[in-house]
Amino acid sequence: MTEAKTNISEIGEFIYPHLTKPDTRFDEAGLYQVTLKVPEAKAKNMIKLFDEAMESSVAEAESKANGKKIKVAPRPYQINDGYVFFKFKMKATGINRKTKEQFVQRPVVLDAKKNPISQSTVIWGGSEGKIAFGLRPYYVASLGAGVTAQLKAVQVIKLVEGGAKQLDLFKEEEGFEATSQETVFNETTEVQANTDF
């Protein structure tokens, strides 16, 4: 299988981002993922790209189906209230299909000036940026033919860190004042560099 072409998204808002630490809630192997919220008016080129990839995936599955009807899997985006929500993901660990070797990977995460962002930075929902991604076709009989939007790299244009929203809940009052400002909800994670997409 050839490497999926890398595409760059429009700037959008990150929804439930897991970009510096994988989400292990439903998969102990870990999953880096983010939903990108883009205004529909700015998402037309992305929608076209996703739709063309879906059509290609269905056509490829049909060519191998010996005349059987092919189910179409759900698209990796949804349109709601004038916004398009694109879902991107990357497995944190797994077994390479070709080499059968175990791999550990993570997305490259950069700031607006293309400097690497520390893995200790907790990127929260409400942050904004761009996603570098590939569209990989798949066919599973139960789901149908579709595409996965494979997360490769992220450029954070506006960072919202843990605790920022909670700090806005209160107004300043007279009273106790801490002598140092500590980062709220800051977590660290150790993940090896990319070895396989």
Image: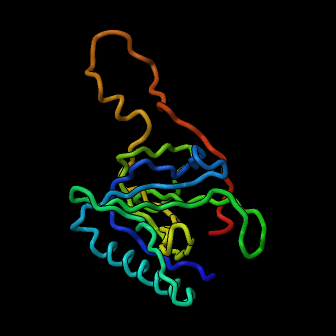
Vertical placement of 183 versus 89: above or below? above
Q: Is residue 134 visible?
A: no
Q: Which residue appears at 36% of the width and 29% of the height? A: 166
Vertical placement of 40 versus 190: above or below? below
Q: Is residue 191 visible?
A: yes
Q: Which residue appears at 62% of the width and 50% of the height? A: 27
Nearest the eye: 41 or 195: 41
In the image, farthest residue toward the front:
68
Nearest the eye: 117 or 146: 146
Say how the picture is coloured: rainbow
Please state, as top left, top right, bottom left or bottom right, where the C terminus lies in the image: bottom right
| Residue 22 shown left or right of residue 57 in the figure | right
| Residue 89 shown left or right of residue 74 in the figure | right
Q: Position of residue 11 (x, y in %)?
A: 33, 62
Nearest the eye: 65 or 84: 65
Nearest the eye: 176 or 125: 125
Q: How many marks?
A: 0
Please state, as top left, top right, bottom left or bottom right, where the N terminus lies in the image: bottom right
Q: Which residue appears at 30% of the width and 76% of the height? A: 45
Q: Which residue appears at 46% of the width and 46% of the height? A: 123
Q: Position of residue 158 (x, y in %)?
A: 35, 51
Q: Position of residue 101 (x, y in %)?
A: 78, 67
Q: Position of residue 6 (x, y in %)?
A: 49, 76
| Residue 129 shown left or right of residue 110 in the figure | left
